[in-house]
Amino acid sequence: MKLAILSDTHGLLRPQVLDCLRDVDAIVHGGDINSQKIVDTLKSYAPLYVVRGNNDKDWAEAIPKELRFSLGGLHFYMVHNKKDIPAELAGVDVVIYGHSHKYAQEQRDGVLYLNPGSCGPRRFHQEISLARMEITDGHWQVEKVVIPHEA
């Protein structure tokens, strides 16, 4: 199973991001989407798992602030801001979050914590990134994808 994991699109789906969605089985979005149009576009590529970010206002009231789901035999927990991750995550294999616009990947107590960074408008002089995950027999492999940008 192949996943595209993104966050903080802030209303921009770059052509390079869309190219990364062409062969995935599901898309995971960690919030700050900006519009229903972005949600609809992502859903046209693959099933979408999404949470609401701090910049997703009235239009996104139906989108949950946190989400638990399973894909490829792994159990996921997702929230936009890392500070909102609960201390107790029994049964969770992967935690997805966004908000900081900075890619982060670490394992703690057998749990993968992954922030795919931001693949929307470039902010804070950060790189533009997303993650791709391949799940085989309940095991994951993550690839960081950096999208080139103009200075």
Image (spheres, rainbow, N blue to C red):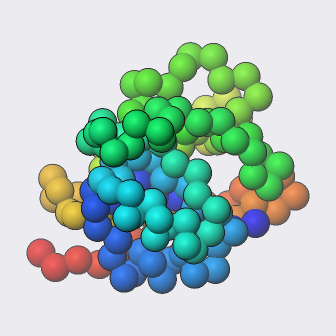
Residue 57 location, x and y as percent?
29, 39
Residue 149 location, x and y as percent?
23, 77
From this viewpoint, which residue is outermost toward the right? 137
- Count of residue discs: 0
Residue visible at 59% across and 36% down? 67
From this viewpoint, which residue is outermost toward the left? 151
From this viewpoint, which residue is outermost toward the top? 87
Residue 5 visible in the current orientation: yes
Residue 17 location, x and y as percent?
42, 75
Residue visible at 12% across and 75% down? 151
Residue 80 visible in the current orientation: no
Q: Is residue 28 above or below residue 132?
A: above
- Displayed quadrant of residue 98: top left
Quadrant (top left/top right/bottom left/bottom right) for the N terminus:
bottom right
Report the side of 37 relative to 121 (left or right): right
Camera-side residue of 57 and 110: 57
Residue visible at 54% across and 20% down? 86
Q: Is residue 60 above or below residue 1?
A: above
Camera-side residue of 107 and 78: 78
Residue visible at 29% across and 67% down? 12
Camera-side residue of 25 and 88: 25
Residue 94 location, x and y as percent?
64, 41
